[in-house]
Image: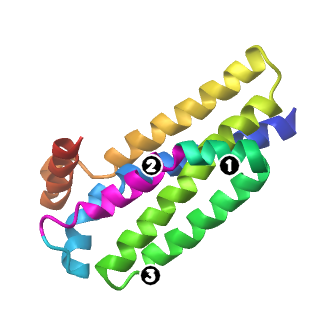
Amino acid sequence: MEQHRLRLGLLAFTQLIVALDYNIVYVALPDIGSALGFGPSSVQWVVSAYAVGLGGLLLFGGRAVDRLGPRRMFMTGLMLYAVASLAGGLAYDAGMLVAARAVQGVGGALLTPATLTLIYRGFAEGPERNRALGAWGMAGSAGLAAGAAACPPPWSSSRCSRARSAAATSS
């Protein structure tokens, strides 16, 4: 039983990170744009590169999981995600950051179907699997919400107010 909880915790945490990373970048978007020399219209690529990599390759990720196995694709996606996160954190120009965000999206496109497959295969059909899927879905929702809520209240920071406005207009 303890092993099931640990497994579910890891899979749910992975989904939380994949979802969180989409939204949390809005908080720092103005600072990223000025620090790395993005123009006003090109800074949106920091968000879009992740979304395109994730959404555009999600079907490919599902097929790769089916053909090569969920554990292998989970580990591959995790490594891609970790390396791309490190590269994004160390990015010194706009192109490097956009490329790192795209690779993060590719990692997420492998992680999402792998985590779902591992839940379907690792938890018995019925209430156990239903609870596991509920926890996985809750973690993804919490990640999206936490990314949007990462700013302090709107009256305390104009930078976060701009980030919230950018998030609201792009969705």
Task: Where is residue 67? Give x, y as percent.
Answer: 75, 46
Q: Nearer the viewer, mark 3 or mark 1?
A: 1
Q: Name the quadrant containing residue 28.
A: bottom left
Instruction: Assess whether residue 52 is covered by the magenta stretch.
Output: yes
Instruction: Assess whether residue 41 is covered by the magenta stretch.
Output: yes
Q: Callout 1: 10 Å neighbours few (<14), some, many (20+)? A: some
- Badge 2 element: helix
Q: Is residue 152 above or below residue 11?
A: below
Per the image, the residue denoted by label 1 is 64
Q: Is residue 79 left or right of residue 108?
A: right
Q: Is residue 105 above or below residue 93?
A: above
**Which amino acid type corresponds to the residue marked 1 in the rendered image?**
Ala
The residue lying at 68 percent from left, 22 percent from top is: 131
- Badge 1 element: helix
Q: Which mark is residue 56?
A: 2
**Which amino acid type corresponds to the residue marked 2 in the rendered image?**
Gly
Q: If you read the primary sequence from the N terminus, does the residue marked by circle 1 or circle 2 appear first?
A: 2
